[in-house]
Image: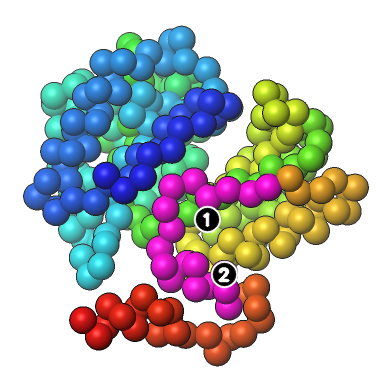
Amino acid sequence: MIDVQADAAHNRMVVTFVAEPGLAVDAAMAGATVATERIDLRHHRGEHPRMGATDVVPFVPFADLPMSLCVDLAHSFGARLWKELHVPVYYYGEAARRVERRELEKVRLGGFEDLVGHIRDPDRAPDEGPPEVHPSAGATAVGARIPLIAYNVNLKTADLQVAKDIAKAIRASSGGLPNVKALGFELADRGLVQVSMNLTDYRVTNIWKVFSAIRDEATRRGVEVEASEIVGTIPLDAAVGIIKDAVVDPAFRMDQILEKRVWAAE
C-alpha cells in the first residue's frame, strides 16, 4: 500500500498500491468487495462525480512493464468484477473497447443517478454485464493508462462561479491547457472554492504550468490562491518537470537528483 487519501467534501477515497501483475487483480478485487459491501450510492453524496462504489480502477504500468499487460489486467479485473460482484463495467483509456469510451468523463457522464435512468440506452450499455446497474454499488470504470496526477488549487473566496470559470478557462476541452481536466467545487466547511484537476499527461502539462495559469486567472478576478494539494502520488519524472519550469532551467537532468545517483551506484 503506497498511499491512501480521503476528503470529506469530495466524499471520496483514493487508494494507491503496487503489486506484481499476478497479484494486482486479486488486490483490486479485495478492495472492490469491501466497497460494494459498505457503500450505498443511493445515500452517498459528495462534490466529486461518481458512478460506482468502486468508481474507477486504473491499472498503471510501473518501471518497464508494458501498457499491453495493464490492458490485459484491466480486462481480467473487469470480467471478475461482473462475475463475482455483479457490478457492470465500462472500459476506458487504453483498455477501452469502444473509441468513444477512451475518456473517463464520457464514461462517467451524469454519474450514478443519470446511469440508473439511461443504462438501457444503446450507447450506455456496459462492456461487462447486462444493462442494469448494481442497486447500491452502481457501475465501475476500469482502465489502463499512464500515471495521472490529481491536483487541486484552493481559492480564497466562497464564490463557486469563480472556480467554475477558472476551471473552464484552463481545461483542454474548453481550449485551455492540453491534457488538463478541471471542475470547480465548493469547500463549504472551509469557506473556500476549489479548482479540482486531473493532469492526464504530465509530460505535456505539468503542475507548475497549471498552478501558474490558475494563479493568473485568479489574480485577474481579484482572488488569491489559498493553497494547492497533490492527491495521491506522482512520478519522480513529474517532480523534475516542475523544477525545470519553476527555475527556468531546461538543462536540469534526472541524473542531478541525489537519490538517483545513489541508486545507480548501488
Q: Is 237 covered by the magenta stretch?
A: yes
Identify which amino acid the numbered label 2 is placed on. Ile
Identify which amino acid the numbered label 1 is placed on. Leu
Q: Is 241 covered by the magenta stretch?
A: yes
**Mark sitting on residue 242:** 2
| Residue 152 percent across, percent down from the top left | 60, 46
Way the structure is coloured = rainbow
Image position of 189 with respect to 203: above or below: above
* 245 to the left or right of 90: right
Give residue 209's quadrant in the image: bottom right
Asked whether residue 121 appears in the rendered view, the answer is no
Q: Residue at x 43, y 38 (%)?
A: 5
Q: Residue furthest bottom?
A: 251
Q: Which of 171 and 255 lies nearest the eye of the viewer?
A: 255
| Residue 143 percent across, percent down from the top left | 31, 46
Q: Residue at x 81, y 36 (%)?
A: 157
- Quadrant the N terminus occupies: top left
| Residue 248 percent across, percent down from the top left | 66, 81
Q: Residue at x 52, y 17 (%)?
A: 45
Give the labeled residue for mark 1.
199
Q: Which residues are magenta?
A: 227-244
Image position of 150 with respect to 56: above or below: below
Q: Which of 106 and 211 lies nearest the eye of the viewer?
A: 211
Give residue 134's quadrant in the image: top left
* 39 to the left or right of 152: left
Image position of 175 with respect to 126: above or below: below
* 9 to the left or right of 118: right
Alpha carbon distance from label 1 to label 2: 13 Å
Image position of 226 with respect to 193: above or below: below
